[in-house]
Image (cartoon, coloured by chain):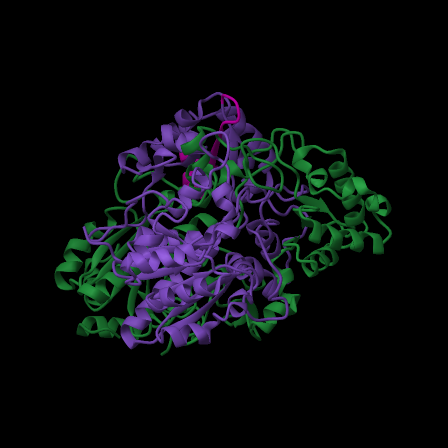
Amino acid sequence: MPLPLEGIRICDLTWIIAGPTATRVLADFGAEVIRVEHGQSVDAIRLGRPIVGERTTLNNSGFFNYFNRNKKSMLLNVRHPMGTDLLRRLIAESDVVIENFSSGVMESWGLGYEELRALRPDIIYCAVSGFGHTGRDKAFTTFGPTAQALSGLSLMSGLPGRPPAGWGFSYLDHTAGYYAAIAIMMALHHRNVTGEGQQLDLSQVETGMILAGPAILDSSVNGRSWRREGMPPGNRAWQPAVAPHGAYSCAGEDRWLAIAVMNDAEWEALIRAMDEPQWARDPKFATNADRLANQDELDTRIETWTSEFEDYEAMELLQAAGVRAGVCQKASDRFERDPQFRARGWWTSLPHAELGEAETDGVTPRLSVSPGAPRFASPLLGEHTWEVLREVLGMTDEEIAEQDAAGVLM
Amino acid sequence: MSGPLARLRVLEWCDELGQLAGKLLADMGADVIKVEPPAGSSARAVGPFVKDLPGSNRSLNFWYHNTNKRSVILDIEGNGAEAALFRNLAAHADILLEDRRPGLLAEHGLSYAELCAANPGLIHCAITPFGQDGPWANYASSDLVALALGGPMMMNGYNSEDVPGAPPIRGHGDQGYNTACHYAVQGTLAALLFRDRTGEGQFVDCSMHEALSSTTEVGLPYWFSARKDVIRQTGRHAAATRTDEWLHQTGDDRGIIIYGVGRDNASWKKIKSWLQSEGFGANFDEPRFDDPRARQQARGAPEAAEIMAEMGRFIASQDSETIYRGGQERRQPWGAVRSPEENLADPHWADRGFFVGATGEGLDEPALMPGAPYQFSATPWELRRPAPRLGEHSAEIRQAAADGRWP
């Protein structure tokens, strides 16, 4: 089947997670993504756990493999003047350049937007950084958790009266990557229509604030902060304020069922599914307002019920009655037990020289005519150096060997 | 009209789940028509509301997610004739975005097959909790339930010694819906680029469940490569084993995320002189602190524990913004735990023009909300119109639909 982004070449200067997430999306949809890697300053995720085997080889990280499937890797010593020349030639043959260095690094290499444009007039140049390439704090830097803290998402995630729980992973590395992929595809469409390229500047902290819009409006319109008594409300609902709404303990070790009752009809359905317990008919739980007012007791009652059940069993029972309920699934649950993923063929594997048959997930959303696909596993460091120089830059083997001997391809 | 999606026509039939996808297209220039039932989208009933007074046109949540759209009332589920108007609009649309349950459009003669027969270039993106098929396709979901099943929640929570019995935690902000929409827009744009090349439209099946499962970072790799589930930890990443704390409490009773203290000599020198200038870490000049390996918490060296204990005292003597800025000025990627609205006072975002003015019923002057998630040099993000009042554009759109043209 055809791939939707066939024929699009991405010069990928990204590392860690945010940038590689963007190029993962583009590669999944068929773009030719060429990771330009420098052996003296290798992507730290190549060393990221989990690894297969006792010690790192730069090619045995399952973490790296997950974010870098469907991509090529070329080694290039960008601190060597001949290396920079090759990078310029690659950029001239690329539709998109993407990087997630600190603000100012590309300029220091003589590869600011104007210079990129001189190499390729319709280039799309996407920069992903912590704070963007303008503004007084543009030199500040982030990891995902930094951006989550500053944007407010960490504070919005936790139990009241406790420190924030987190997000538990770099949610904003994913999200900044998604916005970068979206921006690049929008810019490609604009280029298709007009022939014009452009520069795209993304701040990871801004993408976090984008995801907290209603909370910010509640402050600017109603003067309310999330830093107040009872906030954040844990798993209870903020808006719309409904109850019950939470994660309830089930039989077994660390097993939880999320239940969300959005209205009185769903409350009725929950009562029926629980087999009409007497307490549920108490007038203090009759309306949503009543349930909100008596939420502590309500949650205790429901948890007493769920704790008698195995989580999947309770979920199926509640779903059969039309109640919104879902197991808090671990990775093992998603992979081993989730019938929905299995039925839709979500899991697959791709052969990798050091990881063996490396498992991975599918591509969503699913396009009916030109779907994306996991096609090949992540590249070994420099696996495609010769191929790219030969096929993209049209160099002869003698020319490549010359560069290699000069220490450019490392 | 400007924006990279100028001249693109989008028909949107979405509530809470899919509305962000329409906004992302509309904000970049697409002409998005939002179809609503006579009572209005259910998203209009989601607070907070202007001055806490509920009303169809007073939901701040709705305002935020429906900028740059037009609104038309079509009673598709109540009146068969209304489906014909929808069909006429779809015949002239480039993109249809909808978040109805699987099969609902087909029940009204609006399946992709029927719409595509009249408009082969149509890109029909359906956003659902679990996708169009499979045993859970008709399961009832919500943002909470989706974050549970998809995996993010189980990675987020507390060490049991910090909060005994704490459940996994759902981060707020409807991030399940948001993530579904990010993927929906990615797929829709990929289909658009395919259409640019071939003229051919297609159906795009976007599952929130799949989108969230692909948004769990190290969670899946640990299972794939090591057959381990990561464990939840307070204020930091879930991991295979317990790791060092990142979250610390500052003197103003706020949080700060710090990591990498003493990792390399250059940054250690800067941090050491900063602490000493404030009267902390007097003994850090002792040679035993000179070796980077002695300063690594994970290696269990007593010096590392001493450093972190003194850091804790230093941090507790300062406010969170001071530690944040002081750290960043010393090239440390640390962050203050802010409440979202505290960013309104940070001049860096004003330098970038990030916040823009929301307007609407009950508001005397514009109130600030987040604007562009990305800065495009040639075709910038633009707020052309606020979220529509319910049925604000019904007359012009219904007339055009009846005439068989795009309004």
Image side of residue A85 versus residue B252, left or right: left
Residue A173 position, x and y percent, is 50, 51
Residue depicted at 48% across the width and 56% down the height: A176
- Judging depth in this view, the residue of A209 and A45 nearest the camera is A45
- Judging depth in this view, the residue of B104 and A182 nearest the camera is A182
Can you say whether A143 is above or below B243 in the image? Answer: below
In which quadrant will I find the N terminus of chain B? Answer: bottom left
Image side of residue A362 versus residue A1, left or right: right
Q: Is residue B303 magenta?
A: no
Tell me which corner region of the image, top left, top right, bottom left or bottom right, holds residue A222: bottom right
Q: Colour of chain A?
A: purple
Can you say whether A195 is above or below A306 in the image? Answer: below
Residue B372 position, x and y percent, is 48, 67
Residue B6 position, x and y percent, is 33, 74
Image side of residue A347 versus residue B383, left or right: left
Image side of residue A121 versus residue B226, left or right: left
Tell me which corner region of the image, top left, top right, bottom left or bottom right, holds residue A198: bottom left
Residue depicted at 28% across the width and 74% down the height: A193
Number of labels in the image equals 0
In which quadrant will I find the C terminus of chain B? Answer: bottom left
> Bounds of the magenta span?
A251-269
Q: Is residue A337 visible?
A: no
Can you say whether A394 is above or below B336 in the image? Answer: below
Residue A287 position, x and y percent, is 50, 41
- Judging depth in this view, the residue of B322 and A243 nearest the camera is B322
Q: Is residue A89 visible?
A: yes
Provide the letter of the chain coloured green.
Answer: B
- Judging depth in this view, the residue of A266 and A51 nearest the camera is A51
Residue depicted at 17% across the width and 72% down the height: B404
